[in-house]
Amino acid sequence: MTATGLRVRFDKALQEFLRGAMPALAGIADDLGPLAEATEAFVLDGGKRLRPLFCYWGYRATGAGDDERIVAAAASLELLQACALVHDDVIDGSDTRRGAPSVHRRFAALHRSAGWHGDPERFGQAAAILLGDLALIWADAMLSGSGFTAVELERALPIWDTMRVEVMCGQYLDVVEQARGGGSVERALRVARFKSAKYTIERPLHLGAALGAGPPELSTAFSAYGLPLGEAFQLRDDVLGVYGDPDVTGKPAGDDLREGKRTVLVAYALEAANDAQTEQLRRHLGDPQLAEDGITVLREIIAATGALDRVEELISVRAAAAGRALDDVVMDAEARSALLQLAEAASRRLV
Amino acid sequence: MTATGLRVRFDKALQEFLRGAMPALAGIADDLGPLAEATEAFVLDGGKRLRPLFCYWGYRATGAGDDERIVAAAASLELLQACALVHDDVIDGSDTRRGAPSVHRRFAALHRSAGWHGDPERFGQAAAILLGDLALIWADAMLSGSGFTAVELERALPIWDTMRVEVMCGQYLDVVEQARGGGSVERALRVARFKSAKYTIERPLHLGAALGAGPPELSTAFSAYGLPLGEAFQLRDDVLGVYGDPDVTGKPAGDDLREGKRTVLVAYALEAANDAQTEQLRRHLGDPQLAEDGITVLREIIAATGALDRVEELISVRAAAAGRALDDVVMDAEARSALLQLAEAASRRLV
């Protein structure tokens, strides 16, 4: 099963689930149409399906065979992710997501084109908050309707709950860190761990392993693999947020700088900067009007402090640790090979 | 089992659940303290526990005995309600809830007192969105950890999912109706049905009945009882939002008028108003600065159009229908008597 083949099956499962969920909305009121359409467009349009891939291979690693139940259960993670992203965009006031208008912008535009009363931006935010809530609820419904028995699901539910709590807590810690102005490598790493490493890799693997009734050693190995890999993945994301090519990332150049994201990269830069560099960093980070020349200045400073090299080093160390973590545990050979490929791709950010 | 006695038990179950959930947060980071405290304060401070009461008696109506499992399962509805209210306050920009600062105001104050960077209001919103998400997730975890078996829970899950989808859709329809400027009695009644009647009464009863493995006739009777009662309850709420005593409602006088809520009461008034009255209604409804004299003018117009009488009539008809709906169905005698008392209290809004 290739990643591409699996992505097609995840999309099909999501499409089927949403088609099944939509008549209930239509039965309530026609006015819910835009909510249904925006959810479907958001969930089915793009996304690397990383979380479903890890969940799927976590399940297959136990020796359980391929079937449509695990495809649906794994794909439900994309609905949870839709909630996290849609709410995150409201929180950050982000205008775009995957190169398209973010959900709250989309609903603000609907408000304007309908000529409704009140503030279009507030309407957009309201709709996006509620759409995110719906996606969180649908994630649950898709998992519980995936075809696994109540007893199989019961094994997975504590992990499902823990994962969801962790991602929301990670988001909150991220918001607090931005408000604090950053500067702590330790705190920035903790955000990366909870917001990304556990949520994107470790917990989806655990979820799959629990559905497949894998032994405790397997989950332990998955932590040893997933946590460093997930941190490497987030650190790569941080680097791309500053130095990435907009054509590849789908986000405007230097977007994280304009947003003022307090990443590990920024924390290292603030830690090692001299007074003049600190002054420049503090002045420009989070300036929504930051132009191309300001972005260039910040990029140069972050590299000059050695922060970029240090983060690249962290990524290498973590990717290597992840690559070794599965060596000594018994698992299905196809799953092992798929997970090693995913590790390679995730740390290079090719997936 | 009196309503007061049950409320004490619901609170105890919520407290125990939250105490069990908090160490996981503390294990992530001390910074999560305010999130945990605000959730606990919000959930344990007040609230009429209507949804848990209906869920509990829906279960007991099946003949199932009293136990701590149903108390915990029923109380989990308060965490779902916390999500709905906290997100609703962000959407409406409400400053207070149950006489205390709303969650987003509370976190804006935290931001100010910590002297953090950025806009305190945006930080408050972000924290409230995430706290609402957490409450939605915890509601699930509390239900699935209530002590019912996986098979018993499986019976209840489709209702749980439907109920959660309905309340979010009802909220969205409400937001759309405000944006549209109201004026449709039919649409306002639909909002009352989905946002309140199903969510507050019908579905909690169905949830309890499903946990207790009640027969289909019981759920049918619960719909015949719950929908009119829930609508009566919401219509009473609408009347109190305009004419209510702040000491009783816990909200500033005329708050719904200042917010510009497009209720059934307002829809009737707009429908029957003459040109001069329409002009006054359109000018003042939704004016955040609306002073005492403006409130008095609106109150008089709404009564003069006959809208108040019509809504009172709707409430009476619905309360009477609810009172009769349980007559011909077999159920536990104590549950029947409790549900009739709840109907009486809910339509008078004494609970």
Image (cartoon, coloured by chain):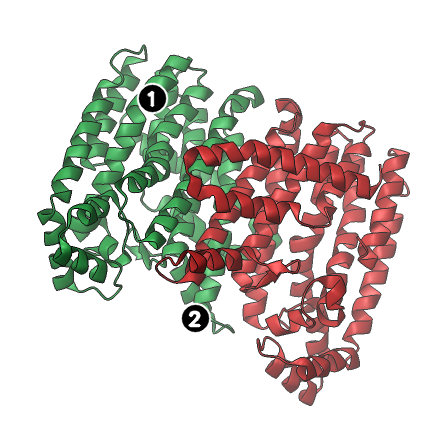
Chain colours: A green, B red
Residue flagged by tag 1: what amino acid is it? Answer: Phe
Rendered view: A72 above or below B43: above
Determine the residue positioned at 84% across, 66% down. B313
Pointer 1: what residue?
Answer: A222
Give the left or right position of residue B6, taking residue B166 as reference: right
CA distance for labels 1 and 2: 49 Å
Give the left or right position of residue A248, taking residue A212 as reference: left
Q: Give percent across and percent down for residue A7.
A: 32, 34
Quadrant of the image occupied by residue A209: top left
Residue B35, which numbered label? none
Quadrant of the image occupied by residue A112: bottom left
The answer to whether marks 1 and 2 mark residues whose Cβ atoms lie closer than 8 Å is no
Rendered view: B322 above or below A146: below
Determine the residue positioned at 50% across, 46% down. B35
Residue flagged by tag 2: what amino acid is it? Answer: Ser
SS class of the residue under badge 1? helix
Chain at numbered mark 2: A
User: Is residue A134 in view?
Assistant: no
Quadrant of the image occupied by residue B64: top right
SS class of the residue under badge 2? helix
User: Is residue A215 in view?
Assistant: yes
* The furthest residue to the bottom: B276
Q: Quadrant of the C terminus of chain A?
A: top left
Q: Nearer the viewer, residue A310 or A348?
A: A310
Chain at numbered mark 1: A
